[in-house]
Amino acid sequence: MEDMKKRKMEDMNNGLQLATSSSSSSSQEHLRSLLEPLSKPQLVELLSRVGSQYPSIAEEIKSIASADPAHRKLFVRGLAWNTTSETLCAAFQVHGEIEEGAVIYDKATGKSRGYGFITYKHMESTQNALRAPSKLIDGRMAVCNLACEGLTGATTPDLAQRKLYIGGLSPEITTEMLLNFFGRHGEIEEGSVAYDKDTNDSRGFGFVTYKTVEAAKKAIEDPQKLLGGRSVTVKLADTHKGKPVQTQIPPPMINLAGIPLAAGYPQPGKVHANTPPVGYNYPQNVASYPNSSYASPPAAAAQYSTQPPMSYPQVPLKKDPIGIPPTTPVGMGGYPFYLGKQ
């Protein structure tokens, strides 16, 4: 009897489990059908609100978001030539635990290429780093963005109006001095002095990129441009090379009013009443020739009668004497000239 009761209890429990699993699957399918029509902003708002109320859901969201390394990897550009992977990681570890970080070096020369990558362990650390993308590392302002975006994610349509070229810098001016001087006009997103890659000496110019176009205009219009005892040049970076602007000259317009046209064409400015459209149709209609035969002209009558050829007796030819014939000497006046005997 007891065995019978145990079997009945097990069957009831199995039935309840099957019913619960089927109801949960049906409810999940029902929820999925409700969520599919929602837009991305609506889903983000819904999950953020639910995650803030239930910590377990928040942890699930964090694990799913951090599973893809593309959401945790940063591209860092504008590094100094002497920046190493250790100094790069030290500058970014304030935002969270770093899984991997390295400066990219040229394989042929072994020197830094001026950029590197930082991969955080959690996506939250990456988001915190992106809130402050500019960092001063080894005297140069470095800027970061998501590596999956590349350089396209770092550029904006108004970048040409925000990036300035600073020329005429003295060799003693550092990047910190440059940023402090131009920071009075507005917040700077990126900027540094240009250094020689081999000697690490200043090249006498630099670049400053403001976060707003208004700040860049103030820097250009500021009459006080004396830095380090020198008057510096400030202008848009796209125009510092002095490239001439090529303008297209429109072709000259020819007035046809004073030019006489060929006969048959309407003259401009004149009224032609009942003038049909001028034009030629090809092929033109040509009158056909009559199919009549023409008689050949009559042959002219012979004026002279034909005569048989006449034979003539052969005359023997006389041979000329050999030599030049003697000539009588002729004197003046045409008279003969005789030489006396000696």
Image: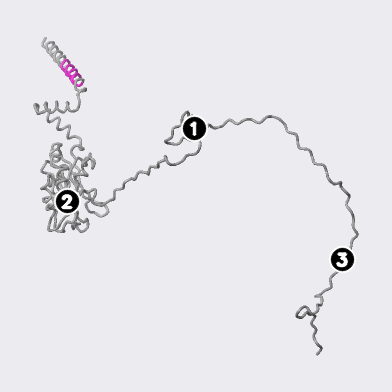
Question: Looking at the figure, which quarter contains the C terminus?
Answer: bottom right
Q: Residue at x 31, y 48 (%)?
A: 246
Element at label 1: loop
Tag 2: amino acid: Ser
In front: 184, or 203? 184
Tag 1: amino acid: Val
Confirm or deny contact between disc 2 and disc 3 (CB under 8 A).
no
Element at label 3: loop
Tag 3: amino acid: Leu
Q: Which residues are magenta?
A: 18-32
The 10 Å Cα crowd at callout 2, few under 14, some 14 to 19, many 20 or more, is many
| Residue, disc 1 | 278
Q: Position of residue 327 (x, y in %)?
A: 80, 77
| Residue, disc 3 | 317
Q: Residue at x 11, y 9 (%)?
A: 1
Apparent side of residue 261 relative to residue 14 in the rendered image (left or right): right
In front: 294, or 116? 294
In front: 311, or 303? 303
Splitting the image into 4 quarters, where does residue 333 fall? bottom right
Q: Position of residue 224 (x, y in %)?
A: 12, 52
